[in-house]
Structures are given as structure tokens and as C-alpha cells.
């Protein structure tokens, strides 16, 4: 084996090793954070089947809804689980339907948001989420065009797309040095790999705000200027309101609304869309 072939082989192993490492990091930060956290925190049946939407797109022929899971009796119980080890978008969707029919818009919106994170293209989840928010007197969510395009696939699919892009780019760059007669084709393959990685990066950018999003699951949440219980509330958040959490302090969280208002709200009155643990 010539020294040049040995050098190329060594570079190939180096690039491939780096690609695998970065792919694992990518899958852990995007797919793992958005998926495993829900698996550990969401009480979801193992073999749930998707039920009929609350606001079906075709009202004249609504399908007959199957039996719904029994909703928990506490407004905060939708965020905890002691025995569930599996999850799915359909299970979260069914749980959201159960809470909506029980008159609990906060937990319903929370589970719809989690289901939408796993299956962003499902029209039933989108329709029910919009219906429950409107019934609660809240404005429907209006994502930007970038967010709609970047989240057209779930985080785990995008993580695998990023892995494929890393491998294609690494192999193409190494092969360019070995097969000089095919450099143009291999450069094109490397460009395709870069575009695949760019798709995953766009998905991560669009999902980043969701990692800090929370839903008001109590009938209301008093927001104060300081994180102390005896402080006079400056305003009150309605149930099912979606806010951004930026800090925590002794049972309170610092929230920011879409209208630009900020303050400290009791942590027990809110639940993160993507749980921390």
C-alpha cells in the first residue's frame, strides 16, 4: 500500500469518526430533548390509536370517536407519570381530547403542543389545538413561514437527515482526494450533504423557542414583579396561555408573553412543553 493511500485511509477514518460523533450530539440535542423528555413525563398509553378531531375539517361526515382515556382529576397531573414508559403523538392527541372534553383547556393545549412537536404535519392536532385555544378566548398561534417549513418533519427525522448529510459530506470530501477524475460529481454530493445538514439546522433553530415554552395549566396564574408570594399581582395569565420561561427562583418562574409583558409566576401553575427531566 502506497503512502498516499495510507494517508487517504487515515483521513477517511478521521472524517467518518467526526461525522458519527457530531451526528450523535445532533440526535441527542434535537431528537432526544424533544422526544425522551416527553416519554419520561407524559402519561400515554402504549398502543393508543388516534381519535376523531374535536373540530373535524369535514363537519358533514364526522367520524365516530373511539373511547377516550380517562382524564386525570388534577390540572397538573398531565405532566407527571409513574408507570408509563412509551409515548406517541396519537396518545398525546387522545389525552388532549380527553382534557378538552373535561373542560380543562390548559392540560389539553399542553398535550396538543407536545403531540404537534412529535407530528408537526398532523391536521387533526392542528385543528383541535386551534379550536381549544379559540374556545378559551385565546388568539390562534400564527407561526412564521420559516417555522412552518422548517418543522414540516419531526425532530427525530431531521436528526437522521443531519446524520445522513454528515456521512455524505465526509465520504464525498475524502473520495475527492482519491478519485480525482470524479471531483465534480463528488463535490455535488458533498453539497447535497451540506444542504441536508442545513435542513436539520433550520429545524433546530425553529424548535429552539419550544424548548423554553410553557402552558398555563391552572385556571389562572398571577404574575408578580418579584418572585415572592405576598407581592401584589401585576397581571393574570388565563388558562391555556402559551408563554416563554427564561429563569427559575424558589418555586417561581420568570415568564414572557407574546405581547411583551414579563413577570414571575408560580411554577406549579405552568408546565413546560418539553419537560426538563
Image (tube, helix red, strand yellow):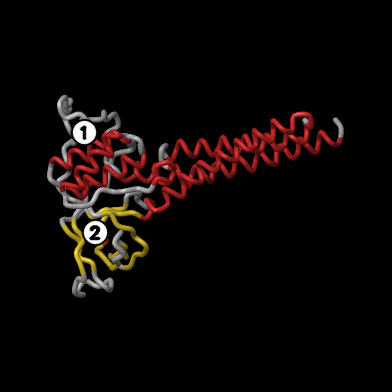
Which residue is rendered at x = 66% and y = 34% of the image? 188
Taking the image as shown, residue 167 lies to the left or right of residue 75, namely right
Residue indicated by mark 1: 53
Are the two marked residues, 1 and 2, in contact with CB atoms closer than 8 angstroms?
A: no
Which residue is rendered at x = 41% and y = 48% of the image? 207
Between 188 and 125, the one nearer to me in the picture = 188
Instruction: Classify mark 1: helix, strand or loop.
Output: loop
Res. 260 in view: yes
- Quadrant of residue 36 in the image? top left
**N-terminal label among 1 and 2:** 1
Residue 143: horizontal and vertical position, in percent?
35, 48
Which residue is rendered at x = 46% and y = 44% of the image? 203
Residue indicated by mark 2: 268
Residue 53: horizontal and vertical position, in percent?
21, 33
Q: What distance separates the C-alpha of mark 1 from that of mark 2?
A: 29 Å
Question: Tag 2: Cα neighbours inside 10 Å, few (<14), some, or many (≥20)?
Answer: some
Q: Which residue extends farthest front?
A: 145
Q: Is residue 271 above or below residue 191?
A: below
Amino acid at each position: 500500500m502506497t503512502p498516499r493511500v495510507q494517508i487517504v485511509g487515515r483521513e477517511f477514518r478521521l472524517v467518518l469518526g467526526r461525522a458519527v460523533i457530531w451526528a450523535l450530539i445532533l440526535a441527542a440535542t434535537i431528537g432526544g430533548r424533544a422526544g425522551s423528555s416527553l416519554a419520561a413525563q407524559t402519561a400515554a398509553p402504549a398502543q393508543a390509536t388516534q381519535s376523531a378531531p374535536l373540530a373535524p375539517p369535514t363537519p358533514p361526515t364526522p367520524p365516530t370517536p373511539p373511547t377516550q382515556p380517562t382524564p386525570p382529576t388534577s390540572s397538573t397531573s398531565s405532566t407527571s407519570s409513574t408507570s408509563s414508559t412509551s409515548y406517541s403523538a396519537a396518545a398525546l392527541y387522545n389525552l388532549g381530547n380527553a382534557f378538552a372534553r373535561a373542560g380543562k383547556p390548559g392540560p389539553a393545549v399542553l398535550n396538543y403542543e407536545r403531540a404537534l412537536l412529535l407530528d408537526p404535519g398532523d391536521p387533526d392536532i392542528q385543528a383541535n389545538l386551534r379550536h381549544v385555544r379559540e374556545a378559551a378566548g385565546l388568539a390562534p398561534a400564527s407561526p412564521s413561514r420559516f417555522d412552518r417549513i422548517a418543522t414540516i418533519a419531526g425532530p427525530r427525522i431531521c436528526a437522521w437527515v443531519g446524520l445522513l448529510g454528515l456521512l455524505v459530506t465526509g465520504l464525498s470530501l475524502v473520495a475527492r482526494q482519491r478519485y480525482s477524475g470524479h471531483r465534480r460529481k463528488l463535490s455535488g454530493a458533498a453539497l447535497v450533504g451540506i444542504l441536508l445538514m442545513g435542513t436539520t439546522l433550520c429545524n433546530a433553530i425553529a424548535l429552539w423557542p419550544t424548548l423554553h415554552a410553557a402552558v398555563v395549566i391552572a385556571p389562572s396564574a398571577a404574575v408578580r414583579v418579584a418572585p415572592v408570594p405576598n407581592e401584589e399581582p401585576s397581571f393574570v395569565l388565563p388558562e391555556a396561555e402559551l408563554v416563554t420561561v427564561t429563569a427559575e427562583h424558589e418555586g417561581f418562574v420568570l415568564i414572557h408573553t407574546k405581547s411583551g409583558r414579563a413577570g414571575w409566576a408560580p411554577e406549579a401553575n405552568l408546565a413546560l412543553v418539553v419537560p426538563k427531566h
